[in-house]
Image: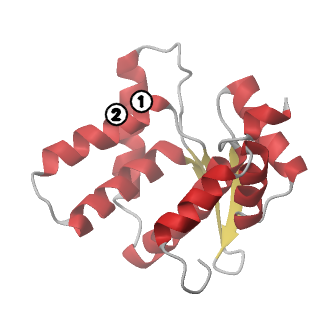
């Protein structure tokens, strides 16, 4: 916001920008180049997912994440309905757990199953819950860092696929 500018003014100005300009701004905010964003788009369009590996704790831990499918959105909604609280901390923890379980592909040498979308629903859910059980065994200080990595990963995927991305094709 510019000094003296109301939040609604800033939003109005942003909405006046062409979609490609808003997309480029989203890329800049996520520290992505257009070429990197195109690779993410190509991967999602070709395979339905995008994967990226991260090394954390000065390279001592490697984790690979993947973009989530639409079923993961429903799982989060169902889990939030089940917690029966309005405590935002509980909601955030639940969302983080479920999103990490839906996204984790590899943790060090442990590789997790992600059955293809054409697999039986029961097989996909079983694989998800196996990942969720694993998430619950990770030490809390490590888990907090994994949530931060997931947030960074999500920001780049969402930026690459944000409004205006389709204009480049």
Tag count: 2
CA separation in Å, label 1 and label 2: 5 Å
Q: From the top left corner, tell me how far across and down residue 58 is, in percent.
A: 70, 81
Residue 71 badge: 1
Instruction: Please give the name of the residue rendered at 42% of the width and 36% of the height, measured from the top-left corner.
Output: 72
Mark 1 surroundings: few (<14), some (14-19) or many (≥20) residues within 10 A = some
Instruction: Please give the name of the residue rendered at 62% of the width and 48% of the height, measured from the top-left corner.
Output: 158
Residue 76 left/right relative to 138: left
In the image, 45 versus 119, the foreground residue is 45
**The N terminus lies in which quarter of the figure?**
bottom right
CB atoms of marks 1 and 2 within 8 Å: yes
Q: Which residue, as the protein is rendered here, is positioned at the far bottom?
A: 3
Which type of secondary structure does the marked residue at label 2 adopt? Answer: helix
- What residue did someone put label 2 on? 74
Q: Quadrant of residue 55?
A: bottom right
Instruction: Please give the name of the residue rendered at 61% of the width and 63% of the height, measured from the top-left corner.
Output: 152
């Amino acid at each position: 916001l510019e000094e003296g500018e109301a939040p609604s003014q800033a939003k109005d100005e942003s909405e006046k920008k062409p979609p490609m300009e808003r997309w480029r701004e989203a890329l800049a905010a996520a520290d992505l180049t257009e070429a990197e964003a195109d690779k993410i788009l190509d991967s999602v369009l070709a395979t339905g997912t995008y994967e990226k590996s991260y090394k954390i704790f000065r390279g001592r831990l490697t984790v690979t994440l993947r973009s989530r499918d639409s079923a993961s959105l429903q799982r989060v909604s169902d889990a939030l309905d089940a917690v029966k609280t309005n405590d935002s901390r509980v909601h955030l923890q639940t969302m983080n757990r479920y999103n990490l379980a839906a996204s984790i592909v590899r943790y060090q040498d442990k590789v997790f199953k992600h059955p293809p979308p054409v697999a039986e629903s029961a097989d996909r859910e079983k694989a998800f819950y196996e990942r969720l059980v694993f998430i619950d065994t990770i030490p809390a200080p490590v888990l907090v860092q994994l949530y931060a990595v997931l947030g960074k990963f999500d920001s780049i995927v969402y930026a690459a696929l944000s409004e205006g991305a389709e204009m480049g094709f």
